[in-house]
Amino acid sequence: MTDRGVTVTCPDCDLRERFETLRPAREHVARHRRETGHEPDWEIGGLSPGVERAGADAGVCGRERCGNPDTPLTPDRLRDE
């Protein structure tokens, strides 16, 4: 089973904390930046299959012609613009 948690670490101090979801991890990163001026790193263990598919369909860069133009995840009206 893939670990879907988020681990936040900081190369400038001994911060290492694990979160079950992305939101509290993001909030912790922002708070750590504000309070210390450090730039923490985070590692996402995995995403839900739907999020992974959406990312793959968008392509690595998310720009036109980089992804899957036949994806059912984008409304037709947006593909034609």
Image (cartoon, rainbow, N blue to C red):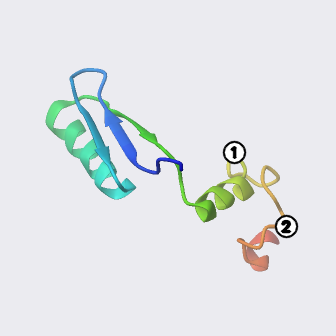
Quadrant in the rendering for residue 69: bottom right
Q: Residue at x 68, y 59 (%)?
A: 53
Where 6 falls versus 50 (above or below)?
above
Q: Residue at x 54, y 54 (%)?
A: 47
Answer whether residue 69 is visible to the viewer in this image. yes
Residue 27 percent location from the top left of the image: 27, 51
Q: Are marks 2 and 1 in contact (CB under 8 Å)?
A: no
Secondary structure of the residue carrying numbered label 1: loop
Residue 73 percent location from the top left of the image: 71, 71
Is 23 in front, or is 77? 23
What mark, if any, has residue 16 been given in the picture?
none
Where 3 falls versus 21 (above or below)?
above
Q: Please report whichever mark, 2 or 1, sits nearer to the chain's N-terminal start.
A: 1
- Looking at the rendered image, the quarter that the C terminus falls into is bottom right
Quadrant in the rendering for residue 76: bottom right
Q: Residue at x 65, y 55 (%)?
A: 55
Label 2 neighbourhood size at 10 Å, few (<14), some (14-19), many (20+)?
few
Residue 19 percent location from the top left of the image: 31, 49
Left or right, 25 with respect to 75, comes to left
For mark 1, what is the residue? 60
Where 38 falls versus 42 (above or below)?
above
Is 20 in front, or is 33? 20
Where 22 falls versus 78 (above or below)?
above
Amino acid of disc 2: Asp
Label 1 neighbourhood size at 10 Å, few (<14), some (14-19), many (20+)?
few
Answer whether residue 81 is visible to the viewer in this image. no
Number of numbered labels in the structure image: 2
Q: CA distance from mark 2 to mark 1?
A: 16 Å
What mark, if any, has residue 70 been given in the picture?
2
* Residue found at the far top of this picture: 12
Residue 26 percent location from the top left of the image: 33, 50
Secondary structure of the residue carrying numbered label 2: loop
